[in-house]
Amino acid sequence: MKKLFTTLLMGLVTSTLSAQTYLFDFSGQKKVPQGAIRITTDMRLTSDNDYGYDLMPVSPDEKSTRFFSVRVPDGNYRITATLGSKRRAGVTTLRAESRRLFLENVATRKGEQQVYTFTVNKRDTLLHGGDRVRIKPRERNKLIWPHKLPFALTGDAPCLHSLLIEPAGEGVTTLFLAGNSTVVDQDYEPWASWGQMITRFFDEHVAIANYAESGERADTFIQAGRLKKALSQMKPGDYMFIEFGHNDQKLKGSGKGAYYFFATQLKYFVDEVRRVGGIPVFITPTQRRSFDEQGRIKETHEDYPDAMRWVAGREQVPLIELHDMTRTFYEAMGVEPSKRAFVHYPAGTYPGQDREFADNTHFNPYGAYQIAKCVIEGMKQLQLPILSALRADYQSYDPAHPDSADEFHWNDCPFFEMDKPDGN
């Protein structure tokens, strides 16, 4: 493995090193490969330095989360991560941007190295003509919009040997996500959404660009310039997955409603994505955790899932029935156990948490992970060609038989938030 890695690494460095290509060596060894940048714990991302540790001081505790960022332009970046250490065994999790999961609990023996490749999408708020995406005040510190690409190294015993970052090229399919708080990359514990978990299951041939934001409706997503920004990055053959309905149903008044205003916004998405050669896919909204006396999920979305199905039928848009799969998932868990998929925690569970969490819309990492698998199963039902990039270790999933919450292992990030995401 080591000889194979060295040959691969040197070939990549000598053939692709450029202004936008970096090889960072975190091994702690004095001698590093030619062209590599040796990273030490005192190197910080600053106004004068385009790469370095970021967000918080580097703790001497090797088990603590470390953030490392590099400034790069918009685009898709192929990441070759080598995990392992000569000094110790490791269990490593690697995330990028806003807690987006890419490598999960990878075990390495002392002296062993494992090489993984995946693709990360980087974007900022800039639009053509000097305009910008109109992000919300709470987004200004989010890690998906700045002029940098952040990585979070965590795990029970994290061991990162090196990161090779290079432009991904034209052979990558980008999957754009449009939606609300059930889709968005949540920055803070204990909140999570399926859009930041689905990255775990695809190889380097797919980049997932999550443009969703908490509280968004289909119309406000368009008005804020989020769709415009995504379209400016989209190429023929790319996808846009579109999940709305949660917040749209709250818009009342003359000329509104599921089959008029909402349906019109969905049609606009379809037309605009197809105009640039993209492939729109609808996703019906996730259910809320709302049970009746018989332990069945109550319908709370009015006509909005049906309106989405109606537009999909008229416009021949592929549709993933997440509405139905999440109903199955929650009912399979049961009334009380299903709380373990949501942000339900007694006061004091997290530092500074002075009140109970009892949120029946927003997921914790376990719930988000399960729902990401539901989305993949919906893709399989549609037989989407993008599934050729599904990682080999993905196992078929049945929401009627969810993974055990007890066996799900997630290393919390150091950042926590009391305020729930916008929308409900």
Image (spheres, grey):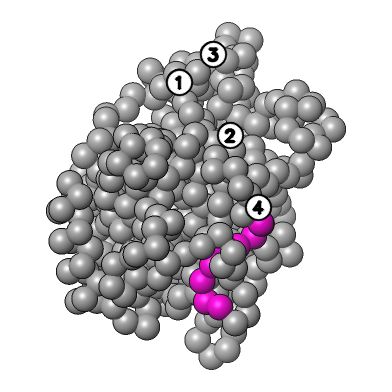
Q: Residues within 10 Å of mark 4 (few under 14, many from 20)?
A: many
Residue ID for mark 2: 364
**Where's residue 370, x and y in %?**
44, 31
Q: Which residue is mark 4?
A: 215
Dot in front, 2 or 1: 1
Labels 3 and 4: the sequence-earlier one? 4
Which secondary structure dominates the residues rendered in magenta? loop
Q: Position of residue 297 (x, y in %)?
A: 55, 21
Q: Is 55 contained in the magenta span?
A: yes
Q: Quadrant of residue 301?
A: top right
Disc on the earlier residue, 3 or 2: 3
Who comes first in sequence, dot 4 or dot 2?
4
Residue 378, percent across and down?
A: 32, 38
Residue at 72% x, 59% y is: 138
- The residue positioned 27% from the left and 50% from the top of the image is 115
Towards the viewer: 106 or 328: 106
The residue that label 1 is drawn on is 407
- The three-letter amino acid code for the residue at tag 3 is Gly
- Which segment is the magenta one? 49-57
Contact (CB < 8 A) between labels 3 and 4? no
Vertical placement of 270 versus 1: above or below? below
